Image (cartoon, rainbow, N blue to C red):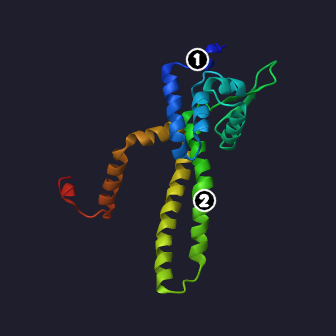
Amino acid sequence: MWPMTYVKHLPPLNRQFVAHFGEMGSRWGINRTVGQMYALIFLSPRPLNADEIAETLEFSRSNVSMGLKELQAWRLVKLSHQPGDRREYFEAPKDVWEIFRVLAEERRRREIEPTLSMLRMALLEEPGSEEERHAQQRMREMHELIDRLMTWFDDVQRLAPETAMQLMGMGTAVTRVLEFKDRLTGKGGSTGKDKGV
C-alpha cells in the first residue's frame, strides 16, 4: 500500500505536471480545476478518493465532486471501492493509448460529429444561386476531408496499441512507401528525385 504522504505532499516534479495540466485545461475544453485533478489521478500510484484530491490540491469538496463527475462523463476515470471503506475511489486507465483513444472518441462525438451532420444536411439542400453552389462545393470539400480523416481514425482505433505505436514510429517511412507505390503505378508523376531512383 502506498503511503498517504504521497498524496498530501506531492514531489516537485509531480506538482509541475499537475500545474501544467491546469494551465492547459482551458485549451483542451476543460477548466483548470478538472485539468489538475486529472493530472493528480493520472500520476497517483493508487486510486484516490475525493477527500484526498481536495486536500492535496486545496480545492473545495464541491469543486472536486463536480470535477469528478465531468471526468466520469468523459470516461477518463474509473470508479472503484476499497474493502471496508464506503468512499468512492478514482483512478485513470493504466494504458496511455486507452486514455488517448477515449479522449479522441469523446472529442469526436462532441465536436466533429455535429459538424459532419450539419454539412450532410447542407449538401442535401438544392442551391438557389451561384453563391450557394460555390458555398456548397466548399462544404463538400470540407465534408470529404473530415469524413476521410474519421475513416482513417476508425482504422487506427481498431489497431492493437503496439501496432499503432509502430505505425506512428515509422514517420516519413510511410510517405516513402506511398511515393514508391505511386511511381510503380504511374500515379505520382516524375520528379527530379524520381529520376535518380
Q: Dot 1, crowdedness within 10 Å: few (<14), some or many (≥20)?
A: few
Identify the residue at horizontal 56%, vertical 75% (top origin).
Answer: 123
2 lies left or right of 183: right
Task: Tell me, for residue 25, which label it has, or none.
Answer: none
Which of marks 2 and 1 precedes in the sequence? Answer: 1
Residue 2 can be seen, yes or no: no
Residue 161 at x, y = what percent? 53, 38
Question: In the figure, 103 relative to 140: above or below?
Answer: above
Q: Dot 2, crowdedness within 10 Å: few (<14), some or many (≥20)?
A: some
88 lies left or right of 2: right
Residue 160 at x, y = what percent? 55, 40
Question: In the figure, 131 relative to 144: above or below?
Answer: below
Q: Which amino acid, mark 1?
A: His
Residue that carries the numbered disc 1 in the rendered image: 9
Residue 43 at x, y = what percent? 57, 26
Question: In the figure, 19 relative to 193: above or below?
Answer: above
Question: In the figure, 21 relative to 83: above or below?
Answer: below
Residue that carries the numbered disc 2 in the rendered image: 113
Callout 2: SS: helix
Callout 1: SS: loop
Alpha carbon separation for disc pair 1 and 2: 42 Å
Identify the residue at horizontal 82%, vertical 24% (top origin).
Answer: 86
Between circles 1 and 2, the one closer to the viewer is 1
State the residue in front, 152 or 30: 30
Q: Quadrant of the N terminus?
A: top right
